[in-house]
Amino acid sequence: MLSNLGRLQQELSKFAEDFRLLGNHIRGSSQKYDDADKRLSKFQDKLISSSAAKSETIGIE
């Protein structure tokens, strides 16, 4: 009985370690997604601005 409890405790400890590691990976992925989303938005804004400026320069509306 005590050996079973010891084994369960080891399994729980390993699971908790894996769970924390997974959480860290998810947080890291989420941060990278947010960073990439911001960069994409800035790029889109620059592209739209430059297209609008070029259209004004050549007289296209």
Image (spheres, helix red, strand yellow):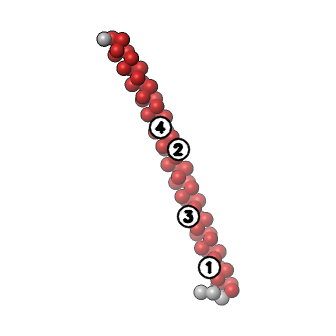
| Amino acid on which disc 4 is placed | Leu
Q: How many marks?
A: 4
Q: Seen from this angle, which residue lies furthest right?
A: 58
Q: How crowded is mark 2: few (under 14 residues within 10 Å), some or many (20 or more)?
A: few
| Amino acid on which disc 3 is placed | Ser
**Where does residue 38 sit, x and y in percent of width and height?**
55, 59
User: Separation of disc 4 and disc 2 at Cα?
Assistant: 10 Å
| Amino acid on which disc 1 is placed | Ala
Pointer 2 with pointer 1, Cβ within 8 A: no
Q: Residue at x 50, y 48 (%)?
A: 30
In the drawing, does residue 5 fall left or right of residue 32? left
Labels 1 and 4: the sequence-earlier one:
4
Q: Name the residue under label 1.
A: 52
Q: Name the residue under label 3.
A: 41
| Amino acid on which disc 2 is placed | Gly
User: Separation of disc 2 and disc 1 at Cα?
Assistant: 36 Å
Q: How crowded is mark 1: few (under 14 residues within 10 Å), some or many (20 or more)?
A: few
Labels 3 and 1: the sequence-earlier one:
3
Labels 3 and 2: the sequence-earlier one:
2
Q: Which residue is drawn at 67% across and 80% down?
A: 54
**Where does residue 14 sit, x and y in percent of width and height?**
44, 25
Numbered circle sitting on residue 28? 2
Q: Residue at x 52, y 44 (%)?
A: 28
User: Separation of disc 3 and disc 4 at Cα?
Assistant: 28 Å
User: Separation of disc 3 and disc 1 at Cα?
Assistant: 16 Å
